[in-house]
Amino acid sequence: MCNLYHMSPREHVERYFRVQLPLEYREVAVGPFNTGLFVRRSEDGLAAVMGQWGMIAPGSKARRPTSRAILTN
């Protein structure tokens, strides 16, 4: 999986997935531990939500790891 991607234009995402995007959606580059769009299943079909791009270790007190450098392509 790539660790850096660009968010598509709002209209393209809404039309392709048939979802309403959150107001905070921005067409920017998203890398590790930035906020990105996730489309997931919901009771009504699909839902578009914003969340952290990158895993958070179980029991972590911070969203970003402090023990090692963040590597990007």
Image: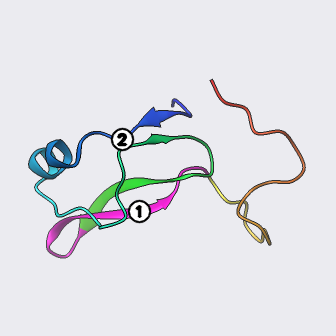
Residue farthest to the bottom, as pictured: 43
The residue shown at (67%, 60%) is 56
Compare marks 1 and 2 and give the one earlier in the sequence: 2
Q: Amino acid at mark 1?
A: Met
Side (left or right) of 47 relative to 34: left
Side (left or right) of 6 relative to 4: left
Quadrant assignment, res 42: bottom left
Q: Which mark is residue 71?
A: none
- The residues tagged by marks 1 and 2 sit, at their Cα atoms, a distance apart of 12 Å
> Does residue 17 sit above or below 48 in this rendering?
above
Question: Where residue 16 sits in the image (x, y, percent)?
Answer: 12, 44
Count residues near mark 1 (Cα–Cα under 10 Å), then give few for <14, some for 14-19, many for 20+. Answer: some
The residue shown at (9%, 48%) is 15
**Which residue in the protein does label 2 denote?**
7
> How many labels sit on residues?
2
Q: Which residues are magenta?
A: 42-54
Looking at the picture, tell me which residue is in the foreground, 49 or 1. 49
The residue shown at (10%, 55%) is 18
**Which residue in the protein does label 1 denote?**
50
The residue shown at (22%, 49%) is 10
Q: Quadrant of the C terminus?
A: top right
Quadrant assignment, res 6: top left
> Does residue 9 sit above or below 50 in this rendering?
above
Q: Secondary structure at mark 1?
A: strand
Q: Amino acid at mark 2?
A: Met
